[in-house]
């Protein structure tokens, strides 16, 4: 059978996204690995390549599968309409984070099957049933919505990440030089764990595994790492360094193997503060950059989101990474109820840290989170295009236009000039004009984001 798997692009109104980072579609590469030996599979990355209409006409797929985060919901439903218009006989399948958290949002006539949770083996069964002309409602864990869309999801007790096949990176060969995060390119992604034991109110990832933390064996990770050609590797885990002994063992066998890469990972501040020696060991084998969710610098805000850290822990983590001369990519959230003094205080705090790059996502009640459950009656928009961490979904204390001017001001002035210049030096000279154009375009768009709400489609 012919199978087309699609990574959608962000909607036009969504800000940033692939302007500064495009990670490989690892979820689709995993799905392909489960079926590609017996079927003709293609991956279309629409963040990097053309229109959907050209592909079905050339390929004529039997099955089209699309992955989706919340911000992609409207885009994905539009793509399925195009697929259905091209050939109503094509089996349409949606999966990914949003399909798992809120499957009802894809309960539309153009979607045949919704996959919840880890999809490799579920998708394999879907393909096999389609090939044998069997109904999808016979699959394990399947249930049918009123419009005949079938939802398939399985409760997984102990989940074996090592039981998954290696992702089929060969199916994204034509794109691989274009996967990157800022100056790190070309960049591959690898998963070493799944889940998080913490209970942050703004995050739903821990709910997907019931708060459990699943890991891969270091030897299995090394085996996959040997197949990766890219010089830069991103650990796309919810929390890479949580299991100190496992990550020490992985660092040791990577060092012994002679593999040398430039690594990029996410880590919580309490993990960093507890185990600075672990990060030193990883720095020695190539860890170059750490994404850190500081979230807030005030204890009362950290307590509000149930982060499980405090300002002192954040400060110790920052000091440890600075001592290691590690590239730090920190995030500080902006609450919609910030007033001008809150913005000014955050700007002053960040300026005092002397960091090269800082992100300021707006606190967003994502589907499936405790925060969404507690604030759903306050939402000023339910337009999925606005789930980009820049559009506020909650009422602002300041007028909207002032809120976005303050947010743009944060991005412009929360770093000393010398740090802004040091950041630019990380890029090849030939990329600087493009980087500066994109940066200025986003700041200019940010200052007018309030206008999106006047003509939104909820």
Image (spheres, grey):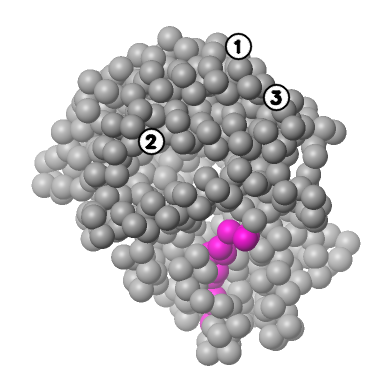
Q: For mark 3, does the 10 Å Cα neighbourhood hold few (<14), some (14 to 19), or many (20 or more) residues?
A: some
Q: Is residue 217 above or below residue 76?
A: above
Q: Which residue is mark 3?
A: 337
Q: Which residue is mark 2?
A: 357
Q: Nearer the viewer, mark 1 or mark 2?
A: 2
Q: Secondary structure at mark 1?
A: helix
Query: Between marks 1 and 3, how big is the CA–CA gap?
Result: 14 Å
Q: Is residue 229 above or below residue 276?
A: below
Query: Between marks 3 and 2, how big is the CA–CA gap?
Result: 24 Å
Q: Is residue 106 left or right of residue 130?
A: right
Q: Give the residue drawn at x 26%, y 27%.
A: 279
> Which x, y percent locates residue 254?
19, 42
Q: Give the residue drawn at x 57%, y 17%.
A: 302
Q: Secondary structure at mark 2?
A: loop
The stretch in magenta equals 2-12
Q: Which residue is mark 1?
A: 300
């Amino acid at each position: 059978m012919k199978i087309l798997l699609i990574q959608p692009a962000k909607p036009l109104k969504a800000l940033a996204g692939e302007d500064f980072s495009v990670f490989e579609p690892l979820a689709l590469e995993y799905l392909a690995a489960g079926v590609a030996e017996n079927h003709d599979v293609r991956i279309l990355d629409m963040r990097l390549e053309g229109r959907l209409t050209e592909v079905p006409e050339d390929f004529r797929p039997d099955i089209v599968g699309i992955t989706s985060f919340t911000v992609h919901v409207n885009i994905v439903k539009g793509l399925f309409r195009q697929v259905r218009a091209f050939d109503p006989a094509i089996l349409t399948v949606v999966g990914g984070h949003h399909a798992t958290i809120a499957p009802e949002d894809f309960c539309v006539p153009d979607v045949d099957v919704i996959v919840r949770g880890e999809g490799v083996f579920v998708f394999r069964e879907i393909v096999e049933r389609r090939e044998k002309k069997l109904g999808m409602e016979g699959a394990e864990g399947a249930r049918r919505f009123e419009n005949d869309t079938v939802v398939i999801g399985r409760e997984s007790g102990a989940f074996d990440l090592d039981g998954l096949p290696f992702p089929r990176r060969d199916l994204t060969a034509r794109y691989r030089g274009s996967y990157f995060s800022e100056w790190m390119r070309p960049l591959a992604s690898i998963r070493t764990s799944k889940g998080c034991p913490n209970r942050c109110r703004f995050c739903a990832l821990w709910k997907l595994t019931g708060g459990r933390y699943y890991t891969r064996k270091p030897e299995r990770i090394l085996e996959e790492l040997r197949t990766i050609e890219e010089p830069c590797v991103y650990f796309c885990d919810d929390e890479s360094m949580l299991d100190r002994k496992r990550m020490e063992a992985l660092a040791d066998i990577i060092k012994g193997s002679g593999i040398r890469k430039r690594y990029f990972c996410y880590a919580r501040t309490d993990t960093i503060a507890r185990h600075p020696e672990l990060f030193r060991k990883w720095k020695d084998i190539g860890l170059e950059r750490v994404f850190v969710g500081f979230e807030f610098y005030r204890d009362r805000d950290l307590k509000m989101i149930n982060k499980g850290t405090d300002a002192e822990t954040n400060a110790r983590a920052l000091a440890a990474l600075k001592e290691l001369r590690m590239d730090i990519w920190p995030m500080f959230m902006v609450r919609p109820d910030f007033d001008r003094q809150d913005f000014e205080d955050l700007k002053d705090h960040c300026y005092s840290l002397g960091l090269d790059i800082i992100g300021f996502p707006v606190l967003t009640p994502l589907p499936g989170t405790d925060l969404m459950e507690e604030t759903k009656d306050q939402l000023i928009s339910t337009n999925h295009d606005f789930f980009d961490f820049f559009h506020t979904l909650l009422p602002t204390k300041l007028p909207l236009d002032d809120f976005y001017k303050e947010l743009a001001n944060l991005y412009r002035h929360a770093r000393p000039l010398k740090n802004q210049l040091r950041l630019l030096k990380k890029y090849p000279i030939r990329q600087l004009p493009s980087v500066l154009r994109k940066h200025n375009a986003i700041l200019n768009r940010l200052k007018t984001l309030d206008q999106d709400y006047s003509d939104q489609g909820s």
